[in-house]
Image (cartoon, grey):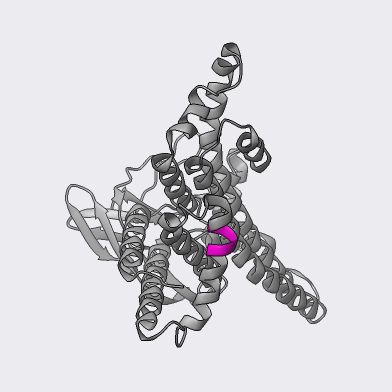
Amino acid sequence: MVISKKPVRIILATFAGLLSSIAFANPVVDTTHVATAVTHEAHATTEVAHNEASHGDEHATQDPKDKVTAYIEHHLQDSHDFVFFSDEKEGKHYGFSLPVILLDNGLKVFSSSKLHHGEAVAEVDGNFYKLYHGKIYKTDAAGTINYDEHHHPTNVKPLDFSITKNVVSMLFTSILLFLMFTGLARSYKKGAIPTGFGRVLEPLIIFIRDEIAIPNIGEKKYRKYMGYLLTVFFFIWLLNLLGMTPLGINVTGNIAVTVCLALFTYFITQFSANKEYWGHIFWMPGVPVPMKIILMPIEILGTLTKPFALLIRLFANITAGHVVIMSLIAMIFVGKNIYADMPISLGLTLFISVIEILVAFLQAFIFTMLSSLFIGMAVQDHHHDEHGHEEENVII
């Protein structure tokens, strides 16, 4: 097997640059607002729980279950710093800060340590900023946050291009992929058999080529898309594995990231599609004219449901895995008998963690498989048969 060095470098560099630049906008999902939008009272309770669990309020008593819920919601969000552990009694957080980059009447660059995890107001060039539920709002010296009737903040949000921990994770994974693939390409110059870590990569590359790309795209056209399929597979897989570390990184559980990944597949599919693909969408052959008119909007909608299925599948499975693992660990602290609950909790956590390792690979495989399938539907010759449409309906 021979892998060209130049195309792989170009694809990897483009992929990393585009994805990272899109994610620089700090795509944090405020899960507290989403989960408590039903009533104002429920939101107020969750807000108190989040603030106490994050800020170490010693003067308020809080139910352990609320603390666990707040911690899980905080873990699933992106953040402007890495926190390894916190001391609630002392109100201290141990980790390191990341740069905050705001566009607010000019460029504002400062360390996230000024925000102190939302406990302090940062003053930059006469402007005041406060971190509230993972988002940065413009405020006054007292850190006042105003609300609307639904208890949503009404303060101005400057454009946020901060380097958050999710962005750091994606940049790290992109650099790692670049080094892995370029190292493998260099090893082929020495002989047909790769050396070093290339011996681990080659079976995986051959697996993606023989089991995913060729069967779905075809032997004549698969090479054009191998660079993207390899990149997206290893990118998702490594991010999933990185999310299982104690660093608390949940990149593929961030829906903004999965949306970006799905858009890559969508645009590649649409711009690679041949005239037969578009002919089946806008004027399906072999059916009466009235049915063609009816089927046209359905087929157009079908082109949008494909990337939607990709992003929701990846987001939901990874997020569910994180929630289950943290909930099992929380059994130790919520239960009344810590000595009886600890063995059960740790045993179940270990079991679920092993399953999550499999899920990390499986989700990368499924995303790559469906991407190649959608690309194959767009580039292959249909010969005016209905097999492609039947297969498409089954997948969707």
Residue 142 appears anywhere in the view: no
Which of the 4 image quarters holds residue 63?
bottom right
Q: What count of labels does the image hold?
A: 0
Q: Where is residue 361? Give x, y as percent.
A: 60, 67
Provide the residue span drawn in magenta.
209-213
Query: Is residue 212 highlighted in magenta?
Result: yes
At horizontal 19% and vertical 54% (from top left) the residue drawn is: 107
- Name the dominant secondary structure of the magenta segment: helix
Q: Where is residue 319? Give x, y as percent.
A: 60, 58
Q: In screen coordinates, is 147 left or right of 370?
A: left
| Quadrant in which the C terminus is drawn | top right
Which of the 4 image quarters holds residue 148?
top left
At horizontal 41% and vertical 61% (from top left) the residue drawn is: 227
Q: In screen coordinates, is 369 left or right of 109?
A: right
Q: Where is residue 218? Give x, y as percent.
A: 52, 52
Q: In screen coordinates, is 110 left or right of 251?
A: left
Q: Is residue 356 above or below residue 29?
A: below
Query: Is residue 348 highlighted in magenta?
Result: no
Q: Nearer the viewer, residue 190 or 352?
A: 190
Q: Nearer the viewer, residue 310 or 381?
A: 381
Q: Where is residue 348? Give x, y as percent.
A: 76, 73
At horizontal 52% and vertical 80% (from top left) the residue drawn is: 200
Which of the 4 image quarters holds residue 179?
bottom left
Q: Is residue 291 above or below residue 199?
A: above
Residue 326 appears anywhere in the view: yes
Q: Nearer the viewer, residue 296 or 317?
A: 296
